[in-house]
Image (cartoon, helix red, strand yellow):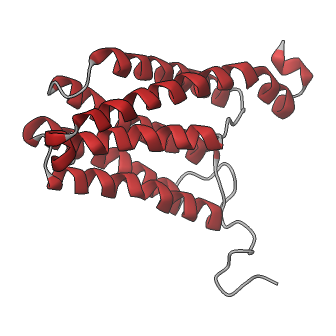
Amino acid sequence: MADPDGEDAPPVFGPTALATPANLVTVARIAASPVFIVMIVSWGARWATFVVGFAIAMTDYLDGWLARRHGTTRAGAFLDPLADKVLVLGGMAALVWNGQFHAVPVIVIAARELLISAYRSRAGRQGITVPATKLAKWKTFVQLWAIGFAVMPPLATNAHWVATLTLWLAVALTVWTGWSYLRSARGVAADQLGDGASD
């Protein structure tokens, strides 16, 4: 029997659905990210900038909860990581522009994210869904906190090394998870499409 909140009920949406509550929240996160980016460039480290960025980032948990409640979709599996990348790469680029982040670690992160996005897009066209791993979720969490620490006024002014250290930790996690994705790509394809898909 399903519980009163519907957590054990059958999925409301199938894997091919597009206009789901979770996907709408994800699209809203993508649309709101430029506001945060402009705030970084225009205002720098202010509490208003931090609060807006934090609020946008927290919608990731909301769309995840909605997806688990109503059913995951292929569109969501593609859009959710894309939303994270728009927020992370846009925020980091703005911080490079302001001189708060060095370009090299951000370029490394951007290269990995774009490479994996291209892989996800190609896999999606072949009907392959590549779910995010737990470590990849932690990678995104650390990336976002690197940005958050950089726009948090007390740390930006008195302890910017916290943001810098977090950024380099994000680089390490980003490179490692990227390698792990590519290393397991053939196995994922074989599992979902059969042995011939990995040829």
Left or right, 82 with respect to 87, comes to right
Q: Nearer the viewer, residue 170 or 37?
A: 170
Q: Name the outermost residue toward the top.
A: 199
Judge whether 54 appears above or below 139 on screen. Answer: below
Left or right, 74 with respect to 40, comes to right
- Residue 119 location in percent, x, y? 60, 22
User: Residue at horizontal 62%, vertical 22%?
Assistant: 122
User: Residue at horizontal 55%, vertical 64%?
Assistant: 66
Asked where in the image residue 92 lies, by quadrant, the reply is top left
Quadrant where the image shows the C terminus:
top right
Q: Name the outermost residue toward the bottom.
A: 4
- Number of labelled discs? 0
Left or right, 80 with respect to 98, comes to right
- Residue 64 location in percent, x, y? 55, 57
- Residue 81 location in percent, x, y? 51, 39
Q: Name the outermost residue toward the left.
A: 42
- Residue 49 location in percent, x, y? 18, 50
Q: Nearer the viewer, residue 16 or 116?
A: 116
Q: Nearer the viewer, residue 77 or 37?
A: 37
User: Residue at horizontal 15%, vertical 48%?
Assistant: 153
Asked where in the image residue 157 lies, by quadrant, the reply is top left
